[in-house]
Amino acid sequence: MSRPSPGTPATPEPAAAPGPGAVHDVIAVGCGPFNLGLAALASTVDGLDLVVLEETAELHWHRGMMFDEASMQVNFLADLVTLVAPTHSLSFLAYLHDRDRLYPFTVRENFFPSRVEYEDYLRWAAARLPSVRFSHRVIAVRRDPASGLFTAEVERADGARLRLAARHLVVGTGTAPHLPDALATLPADRLLHTADFLHRGEDVDAASHVTVVGSGQSGAEVVIDLLERNLAGGPAVSWLSRTPSFAPLDYTKLVLEMTTPEYMHYFHGLPEATRDRLLAEQWQLYKGVSTDTLAAVHELLYRRQLRHGLRPVELRPGITVLTAGPAGGAGGTVLRCRHRDTGRTFDHRTDLVVAATGYRARTPGFLAALDPLIRRDAAGRPVVRADHSVDLDLHAGAGSATGGGRLFLAGTELHSHGASAPNLDIGAIRNAAILNAVTGREVYRLPKATAFTAFGPPPATDTAPVDGRHHGG
């Protein structure tokens, strides 16, 4: 390859065709916890060729929300491997042992690692997996109709282009920050998503009034940071939420059984309309706030009572933001809001809006060529099978092969698998199911009994009484 002369933009090398035999069993796109866990479990499966492609140069995990004191909401057993392979060399306990922190972790008696520690664990595991390739951006993926193989066009950091082929494809690129229509038109200097909060510190420092819209764990953690700033003489703080209260995550034992593989299997078998109704009802399983975080918010509010001259703070649940726009000559932003219980509308003025409005599943641009093959439900979402593979219409193109591999989704199948789908504690179970599917054998034994609760009706039986008489109830 000749080098371009100074000042001349480099022209990327054309993508090289895969060589003879250069067909992987699995290409996994994205190196978050889910696909990293897939690589970890695959590393001990003899004869399985899996590669993970990540466009960034190194692993980062929620850096915009990496508060020093932030704790995980799942315990350390919900690591990359333990729930299906507790003796695996890439478990969280193996990480602690390697870092010589196992004994202090035991004395600490806290099963919930900090978010900083969990990211360090992920980076430790990634460094031990040669199947993970950073600085490899997937540009496009296509399916060859003759062979049924997936081909990925990939660009490396040096501009070189590769063409990789695989029998199966796993998409684990995660979800995208969501901005509701009511906020999306605000100028970038007056709006940020919680995902970018720590990257926008200068904007927060410059504001006299910061308003958090939305609740959930991320919103509450931002509110804690803002309350600490307020106690130090920082901006006024408002917290507006659609929910009727600032409610905790429901971590009661039997409710948590609705995040188990057993409930996931039950949920997947329900009609689409029933699944959608249940997801709306179960919001406290994945949209609430940890009780420790709510207690920290309350403690900071209590401490404010002993101080004078601080800028005001308000918490208002049951609020819908209808529109948002510039405040006119005075500067700042006006949110047109409705109080959900009374229906009364009012204007809320602020300098900076922090959207704690969650994340949404996204279809990566590199899947555009596969889009015509993806069967969708009534709401336009991919139809996902129980093994997390997408239902593909392999007759959508003339001459398409009916064989070939499968396209799997990792972490974005909330609509088909329920509230636990985005949770870290289901990652190892899903990855084991994917590896069993692509190998055609049980390389990892999936748990058979994960809940005491029976979620479905009892088996159908003959209800006629033995003595011929009917007993009413």
Image (cartoon, rainbow, N blue to C red):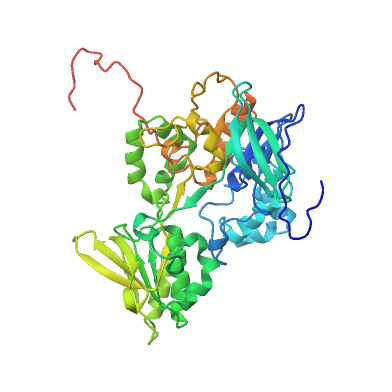
What residue is shown at x 44% (from left), y 76% (from top)?
A: 207
Q: Is residue 432 above or below residue 179?
A: above
Extreme bottom residue here?
309
Does 361 sit left or right of 172 as displayed? left
Q: Residue at x 32, y 35 (%)?
A: 273
Front in this rendered view, residue 173 or 329: 329
Residue 289 picture location, percent across and down: 42, 58
Tell me if 437 is positioned left or right of 220 in this view.
right
Q: Which part of the image, by quadrant, shows the C terminus?
A: top left
Q: Position of residue 168 (x, y in %)?
A: 62, 30
| Residue 173 shown left or right of residue 439 in the figure | left
User: Can the viewer see residue 109 in this picture?
Assistant: no
The image shows residue 123, relative to residue 148, as above or below, that is below
The x and y percentages for residue 346 are 23, 68
Do we see residue 80 in this rendering?
yes
Residue 455 screen position, x and y as percent: 38, 34
Q: Name which residue lies at 52% across and 20% down.
A: 398
The residue at 19%/60% (across/down) is: 343
- Vertical comparison of 289 with 276: above or below: below
Q: Above or below — where is 85 with respect to 106?
A: above
